[in-house]
Every structure is written in structure tokens, then in C-alpha cells.
Image: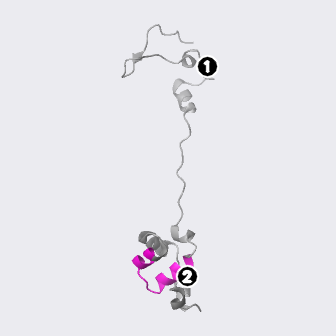
Amino acid sequence: MKPKPEAPLGTFKNGIPWTEPQNYLEGDRDGMTKHEFVAARRPAPTVKPVRGCHVCAHPERVRIEALRVSGVSIDKLAEQFGVHRDAIWRHCNKHMSEETKASYLMGPSQIADLAV
């Protein structure tokens, strides 16, 4: 066990003296070094939640996809559905396969009916 320091080890910027906390000095660390003990007491880092695609989560995703494939501009869709234009662009490039795009063009639904 380390001997207790008689004088403060230093001072904070405001002038208050600083000494090692008693649990460091008395060996109340369960065999851990000082650095391991401090690391173990730190809270776990918070993880940012993963945000999903706004278009995939949109209740009118099918209409957005069908209108985009039919040629409606991204800016018009963004304005109409309240989704950022970049989110629509990313969704169409990353989440829509060529088969999906073709099925919208060749399917039985009429694009004019969807554009109400």
C-alpha cells in the first residue's frame, strides 16, 4: 500500500488543492491499476441510434417510388411528401432494384391515379 501524501499533489485552476482520492490510496481497487480503475468507473459511451431511410419509413413510400420512376422530379416529390430531396435520391439509388423500377412502369396501376 502506498503511503498517504502529506501535501496536496497540485492545485486546480481555481486554486483549490488536489489530492488523490482515498480509494486510490487505500488500495480499494480490487487489484486494478489506477488507470484501469478510472476506466472502469467511466460510463459506457453512448451509441447514436441508426437512422433509417425516411422514404422507406414513409406511409406513402409506394406512391413516392412510382411517381419517381414515372419521371416526376425529385424536387416536386420532396415538396409534396415532406421528405428531403436527397433522401428520395438516395432511396431510389440504394433501395430500389431495377426490377422494382420496371414493375412500377409495367404494373397495372395507373400513374395518373397515383398523382392525385
Question: Is disc 2 placed on a helix, strand or loop?
Answer: helix
What residue did someone put label 1 on?
28
Magenta stretch: give its range. 61-79
How many angstroms separate mark 2 from mark 1 (CA)? 63 Å
- Seen as rendered, the residue at the extreme top is 6
Determine which of the numbered discs, if any, sits on residue 100 in the image: 2
83 is within the stretch colored magenta: no
Question: Is disc 1 placed on a helix, strand or loop?
Answer: loop
Identify the residue shown where x is 55% and y is 91%: 110
Seen in the picture, residue 56 relative to 106 is either above or below; the reply is above
The x, y position of residue 100, in whole percent, is 55, 82
Which quadrant is the N terminus positioned in? top right
Identify the residue shown where x is 51% and y is 78%: 64
**16 sits left or right of 24 in the view:** left
Seen in the picture, residue 24 relative to 91 is either above or below; the reply is above
The x, y position of residue 91, in whole percent, is 49, 72
Q: How crowded is the residue under tag 1: few (<14 C-alpha within 10 Å), some, or many (20+)?
A: few
**96 sits left or right of 18 in the view:** right
Q: How many marks?
A: 2
- Seen as rendered, the residue at the extreme front is 116
Seen in the picture, residue 64 relative to 105 is either above or below; the reply is above
Q: How crowded is the residue under tag 2: few (<14 C-alpha within 10 Å), some, or many (20+)?
A: some
Amino acid at dot 2 = Thr
The x, y position of residue 83, in whole percent, is 47, 70
Amino acid at dot 1 = Asp
Determine which of the numbered discs, if any, sits on residue 81 in the image: none
User: Mark 2 or 1 closer to N-term?
Assistant: 1
The x, y position of residue 71, in whole percent, is 43, 86
Query: Which of the two residues, 73 or 103, is positioned nearer the viewer here?
Result: 73
